[in-house]
Image (spheres, helix red, strand yellow):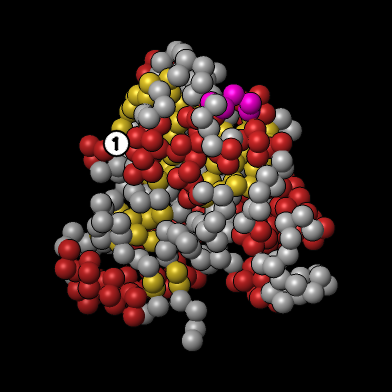
Amino acid sequence: MARVYNFSAGPSTLPEKVLQTAAAEMMDYHGSGQSVMEMSHRSKWFDDIIKEAEALMRELYQVPDNYKVLFLQGGASAQFSAIPLNFMNGSGKADYIITGQWAKKAFQEAQKYGDVKAVASSADKTFSYIPKTKAEDFRDDVDYVYICMNNTIYGTVYKELPPVGDKVLIADVSSCALSEPLDISKFGVVYFGAQKNVAPAGLVVAIIREDLLGNARDITPVMMNYKVQADADSLYNTPPCWTIYICKLVLDWIKEEFGSLEAMKAHNEKKAAVLYNFLDNSKLFKGTVVPEDRSLMNVPFVTGDEELDAKFVKEATAAGFVNIKGHRTVGGMRASIYNAMPIEGVEKLVEFMAKFEAENA
């Protein structure tokens, strides 16, 4: 069977070269006589894998020396608890900007641990824009300000960071990780679940400024204590070895195919323009996000007719464009066009959309 074009928001498509390499090394990784799935996390082979993954992550993101790169478990959602437990321990206050479901869930979880305020929200228009904030919107004594950089469900992204001054900024970048350059020095913490743009599900990467470590609350579960994980070089317990291995292969692929995240961004801009240009000129389909806040990774769109949306999803699936149904809170369709989605996949989707429009408009 031919491979489909997988527009899933996550777990999502992986580079074919990565899948081919993993398949070739499945039974015998580099002469070890075993699969990465089987080997000890204390072995020389896996030690090389995790160190290479960290080195590549540091190189591509240009991570400053005073930041730790951690490979953790629990996914991004576990960090909703770990972040206030580790960092909301000065004033016991934090400010959150609510730009979608995941920011809202993080906000709700943090409320268990301190004085947490939603300083801005775009819920009034189904999270179809990024709310503008001013420096005075943020409380002077907060321990941190929290944002979700790219909103998977709603297709919005921060083009400019909120004006937080010298306050600690923490960002969930799960659905835009490694898709473009990011100045890590502007953040106290950046973290991302791997299953959208980096690797299969089971891994979360956290990049944390070292001076923020060591202040976790006494009640913090040991697995959520970032200082414990940093001191153990992400090996406090058995990590998700296979997922870290695939992460390393993906990082290799980015470096070999594009060379830098600047080039990766240019590729993603070219790819997204194919779909957005069609939507902007279509008589049937329309995007749901204000143009200035459009994501390069997640593109929600609708026809305005629920029955027609359902027909499109059914016919698109039959034609090999899978996982394109939109989230229930938005409706319609969503094409997640992460790094590994080839341009021809988007071009073929647009061809199919044009055909559907001609037959149904």
* Most foreground residue, 303 or 250: 250
List x then y, in percent, for residue 174. Answer: 50, 47
Residue 148 visible from this viewpoint = yes
In the drawing, does residue 337 fall left or right of residue 154?
Answer: right
**Which quadrant of the structure image shows residue 356?**
bottom left
In the drawing, does residue 85 fall left or right of residue 127?
Answer: right
List x then y, in percent, for residue 103. Answer: 38, 39
Name the residue rendered at 16%, 63% in the picture.
305
**Which quadrant of the structure image shows residue 279?**
bottom left
**Which quadrant of the structure image shows residue 127?**
top left
In the drawing, does residue 190 fall left or right of residue 37?
Answer: left
Q: Give the range drawn in magenta.
A: 213-217
* Most foreground residue, 86 or 264: 86
* Most foreground residue, 324 or 84: 84
Name the residue rendered at 58%, 38% in the picture.
222
Q: How many labels does the image show?
A: 1
Numbered disc 1: secondary structure: loop
Question: Which amino acid is tagged 1?
Answer: Ser
Q: Mark 1 points at which residue?
A: 122
Name the residue rendered at 66%, 53% in the picture.
238
Name the residue rendered at 54%, 37% in the picture.
221
Q: In which quarter of the image is the C terminus?
A: bottom left
